[in-house]
Image (cartoon, helix red, strand yellow):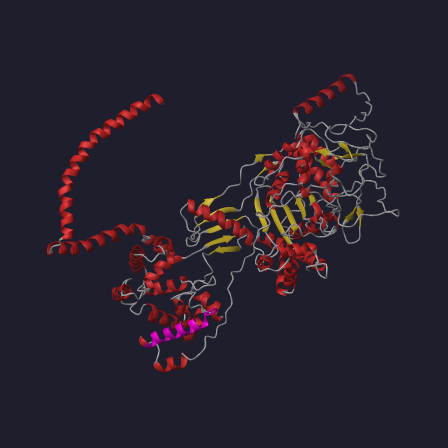
Amino acid sequence: MKRYVPLIRDRIAKLFSRLKPAATRLGEFARPYVARGLHHLRHPTRRGVLMTAAALPVIVVLYVLVLIPFTPGIGDIRKARVDEPAQILSADGKVLAEFKPSNREWVPLAQISPHMVDALIATEDHRFYEHHGIDFKRTAGAALHTFSGARQGGSTITQQLARNLYPDEIGRAPTLTRKIKEAITAFKIEAVYSKQQILETYLNTVPFLYNAYGIEMAARTYFGVSADQLDILQAATLTGMLKGNAYYNPVINPERALARRNTVLGQMVKYGKLSDAQYATLSKKPLRLDFERQTEPPGPAPHFALQLRKWLIAWADRNDYNIYSDGLVVRTTIDSRLQQMATAALRQHANQLQGITNGAWSGRSGCTAGNDLFATFMRETQDYKSARDAGANDADALKHLAADRNFMRNLCKDKTDVQAGFLAIDPRDGQIRAWVGSRDFTDEPFDHVQQARRQPGSTFKPFVYGAAYAAGAKPTDTFIDQPVEIPLAGGEIWKPTDDVPPSNRPMTLRDAIAYSRNRITAQLMQTVGPDKVARLARAMGVRDSQLDPVPSLALGTSPVTLKEMVSAYSTIANDGAYLEPRMVTTIEDRKGNVLAQFADASPERALSEAADRTLLDTMRDVVNRGTGAAIRSRFGIRADVAGKTGTTQGNTDGWFILMGPQLVAGAWVGFDDGRVTLDDYWGQGARSALPIVGDFYQRALRARLVDSRARFDTEVTPGAFETFREKLRAWMDKLFGARETPPPAAPVRRAPPRVTAPAVTPAPLPASAASEASVAGGAAASGVGEASAPGAASSARELGVPPIIGPSGTPPPQVPQQPAYPAQEPALAPTPTPDVAEPDTSGANATYTPPVAQPQQGQ
């Protein structure tokens, strides 16, 4: 390339050398004409003045012609008047939402009070029926007043309509260009609309403050009546606001609004719409407002609709549609019946938790300055900072705020409001069936399904076990339940714990996930490696949040969204194939023509089928006999389901996700401020989040929206090598005769190399240290469960009731049971017996390493 630079430079130099003489000649040719023009400017002649005067209209006409392409076209104007917002439908045909550009309800002109029409025309455009978009007399008068220093508006109703409909195309600056664009658009509107249509469109699009657009919403907001019920005084008040909504706001500026209203009444007298006697009587009357802000009903799935609006706007922009006026019909994946069940279940159980929270935060130790945590909340407010800036010390500022009851009440509510999120997905096609982002959309529009990122706790553990099964581990493989110390970068030591002491005995992976043992999971994480676990979690659906590949990731230390977790569990329920969650199936126009159809997403293999089925089968034990046993005992769900509970450090976050062949549902419960927590009992995922999912699933099964007879296929197909080996063994047995083989010796098992286990006296608990106990009130009881892990997200006991304590104050020895599914209802299929392996206790005095990949240094 360098060798061409001199050549290019020479060519450019030659080009300029050729152009220079031509430029010189052009300058010499133009010089006399320029000199002559300057001379005429200094010494104007009558002819020159006349030519200049004649040229000005030509220049204006040319300027107008140039601006025409920059104004809305006739087609756009016709489309704007239709004003058909996109309609959002559920999968079963129910209306979920309408995407309106504002808080507006369109009413025909016949349903608008004639007093409003008379007041509008008399005040804003008394020659409305005489002009064709521009009142030239009024425009000229406004121009003269403006030039004399008294600025005056000259826009007609049609021009104002043009400005209201197309603020971006016409502009907002008080310039000549804007006025010309406004006039051009007004001419186009008059060519398309009749005068009655122009009035109707104007009155339905004009803004009136407080998010009220159009005369119907204005009438409701300021006077509590419909547009057809407005009397003369009310119509005059609303018309007076059009000159300046904020300046003549009758709520905060009643004196100005009253004076302006009487001015409108005077205009109605001037143009024959009101008699002098009526004016004399009416002008003395007060405003008499009945003000109330109008809010749009949130609809049955408001958080879902909010996310869908963002997606639909992007789709419409790409395909040249308007979601506010093109009458689009969007068919979504939401099932309105499941949505209603999810909303009811979440609200009911979250309200119960709110009652518990209110009790905990009441009294002297609750929302008072004497509570250290609440005092911290008070110091973080702007009111406290303002008090300090004014010179008050800390104690005086807190005392002053504590005396303000409204401040304390609002701060307490803001910090101690229990929040929750819920999501349900069909794992067979990735369609989202129910989405509840908070307890109440009106009070809390923040979406805890897609926007909130929280630590998932033990609900992250299946990714660790899935990675282990993919590497060759089996549910019967064991680790020693012993103290664990894992060195971290910087010389720190991580010591995950459980809420029961270590037994120093083997525990199978099946039991470890059922009872959510942190020590076993941490050892398995070291064997598999954090990088592999993070990659698997991303492949299965945790694709938007950052996952830190560190040992504590096994217990869910990296914040994620509920949508990601439910999507990942849907992958588990779908034989390890990830499907991107879907919200929309088709988009149609107002006539029913299909504009776009969205097929199911292509499956992406995240986990091998064999490993996924093994993982799914072991997660059945979580609800059969483990930390999620309340699904069976409390809610009586007998369908084939699997799931996982989760609780983070200090009971900050409660999680539960339940998987069925046709529906995966998950819930999160907590507070917006993570420093506020539930107590050790109610804060556990099995008591905070599980009831929401259990209640929802119970309702769905009873309504037969989910088939209780559907079952997971967890039969693991043997590979080619295993098949060949079995055939060879059968052939050898047939050829040489079957020989009795002794039972295999227990393999020698060793703990992972990066886990140190100091000598500890064996605890009196057996290998699994757990059993399922039936407790009055429903939930299963056990002496084991999820426990806190210092320095990381961890979990606590999640079995639905406190542990059984022996007379000596320690949990009594328990024998693991192998429960079968409870008997099905008569209408259901016969109940199969789950494939549950007995805990492997043959290696009670030995250790071994399962056949999984060893971690690399530094993982």
Confirm whether the magenta stretch covers residue 271: no
Per the picture, the main secondary structure of the magenta-coloured stretch is helix
* Left or right of 833, for residue 246: left
Q: Is residue 344 visible to the viewer in this orientation of the structure? A: no
171 lies above or below 17: below
The answer to which of 477 and 452 lies nearer the viewer is 452
Residue 346 picture location, percent across and down: 64, 54
Residue 52 picture location, percent across and down: 16, 54
419 lies above or below 233: above
Quadrant that contains the N terminus: top left
* Left or right of 281, for residue 437: right
Residue 605 picture location, percent across and down: 59, 33
Farthest residue in the top direction? 736
Q: Is residue 837 visible to the viewer in this orientation of the structure? A: yes
What span is in magenta? 250-269
* Left or right of 595, for residue 508: right
514 lies above or below 470: below
Confirm whether the magenta stretch covers residue 267: yes
Farthest residue in the bottom direction? 277
The answer to which of 158 and 113 lies nearer the viewer is 158
Residue 285 picture location, percent across and down: 44, 79
* Left or right of 573, for residue 263: left
Farthest residue in the front direction? 391
The answer to which of 573 and 184 lies nearer the viewer is 184
Dividing the picture into quadrants, the one containing residue 242 is bottom left
Quadrant that contains the C terminus: top right
Dividing the picture into quadrants, the one containing residue 216 is bottom left
The answer to which of 178 and 51 lies nearer the viewer is 51
